[in-house]
Image (spheres, rainbow, N blue to C red):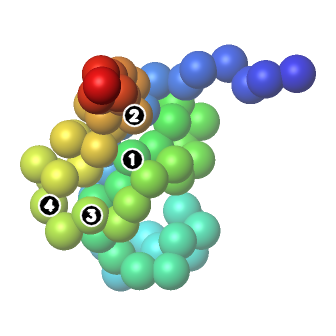
Amino acid sequence: MVAPNHDLFAVHVASDDVGDYKVSEPGWYAADDNEKVVLGPFASLAECERAIRDKKSPPAAAAH
């Protein structure tokens, strides 16, 4: 059974919070509505938001 498609949001994980999110380094991450990290780390909020946008609607394959 496939898990439902959760909404993604950007979250900044500080050094003190790395263990709480089960990630290895601080930075910007995309997390689902259960606060599970899905993508990252990213150096900036803009990069994280772009990755979230791309994950929600991947670019169409180039036609040949």
Q: Quadrant of the N terminus?
A: top right
- Which residue type does callout 4 highlight? Ser
Q: Nearer the viewer, residue 49 or 18?
A: 49
- Residue 42 location, x and y as percent? 26, 64
- Residue 50 location, x and y as percent? 20, 41
Question: Of marks 1 and 4, which one's residue comes earlier in the chain?
Answer: 1
Q: Which mark is residue 30?
A: 1
Label 1 SS:
strand
- Residue 22 location, x and y as percent? 59, 68
Disc 4 marks which residue?
A: 44
Quadrant of the image occupied by residue 8: top left
- Residue 61 location, x and y as percent? 35, 27
Q: Which mark is residue 42?
A: 3
Mark 2 and mark 3 in contact (Cβ < 8 Å)? no
Mark 4 and mark 3 in contact (Cβ < 8 Å)? yes
How much space separates mark 1 and mark 4, taking CA atoms?
11 Å
Mark 1 and mark 2 in contact (Cβ < 8 Å)? yes
- Which residue type does callout 3 highlight? Phe
Mark 4 residue crowding within 10 angstroms, few (<14) / some (14–19) / many (20+): few
Label 4 SS:
loop
- Which residue type does callout 2 highlight? Lys
Q: Which mark is residue 22?
A: none
How much space separates mark 2 and mark 4, taking CA atoms?
17 Å
Residue lying furthest right in this view?
1
- Is residue 13 shown to the viewer in this render? no
Q: Using the image, determine if residue 38 lies above or below residue 7.
A: below
Name the front one of labels 3 and 2.
2
Identify the residue at horizontal 68%, vertical 18% (top origin): 4
Q: Nearer the viewer, residue 20 or 53?
A: 53
Label 2 SS:
helix
Disc 2 marks which residue?
A: 55
Question: Of marks 2 and 1, which one's residue comes earlier in the chain?
Answer: 1
